[in-house]
Amino acid sequence: MRPTLLPWYIVLLISIPQTFLIIKIGFQLFNLYLSYSIALLLSLIVGIFAIFARELPLPFGIHTMILLVSSTLLSAIVTGSNFWHCFISIVTGVLILGVLEGVLLPVLLKITVYTTDSLVLEPWLNILYFLPSGTIMMIFYYFAKKRNYVIFDLNLDRD
């Protein structure tokens, strides 16, 4: 079955903010500096990749891997950071988002009249369901940045 086209408003209102938060949280947790403008630029480029990746007739999950690798490559090229440092940071951000969505989505679906099929048939619902996890990620980033919370300082190993 051919995948459905990813609407532009989903890219603008979900893919780009998700990627931005994934990158900023991941880089913060490993003490790698990345300006807001560079993170936004990377998010915009990855958002464009998301449109094209979604068009590829690939098994479930492969699209995410393509976006993970493209985000890592772009981050490493643009920042000049070590590829593996970028990869670890971005995977951490993706894992945080995945856990949040894995916990919140079933709860939100249970308290509303919608199903996972509704999310495919009515893409605008994805925006509604992204708001809680996006908000939690923003709050998490704010406190991690404010308190300078770092899991492991990859900035010490700049080779």
Image: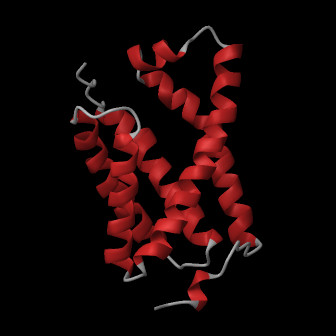
Choose between 46 and 124: the one closer to the eye.
46
Q: Is residue 87 left or right of residue 6?
A: right
Residue 16 in sight from this viewpoint: yes
Q: Is residue 17 left or right of residue 58?
A: right
User: Where in the figure is residue 104, as x and y percent of width and height?
Assistant: 68, 32
- The image shows residue 110, relative to residue 45, as above or below, that is above
Residue 35 in sight from this viewpoint: no
Q: What residue appears at the point 47 percent right and 49 percent down from the top-left corner?
A: 17
Q: Quadrant of residue 106?
A: top right
User: Where in the figure is residue 39, as x and y percent of width and height?
Assistant: 43, 65
- The image shows residue 156, relative to residue 82, as above or below, that is below
User: Where in the figure is residue 35, as x and y percent of width and height?
Assistant: 48, 74
> Which residue ends up furthest to the top in the rendered image?
113
Q: Is residue 26 left or right of residue 103?
A: left
User: Where in the figure is residue 139, as x and y percent of width and height?
Assistant: 70, 53
Marks counted in the figure total 0
Q: What residue appears at the point 29 percent right and 57 percent down from the top-left corner?
A: 45
Q: What residue appears at the point 39 percent right and 65 percent down from the top-left corner?
A: 72
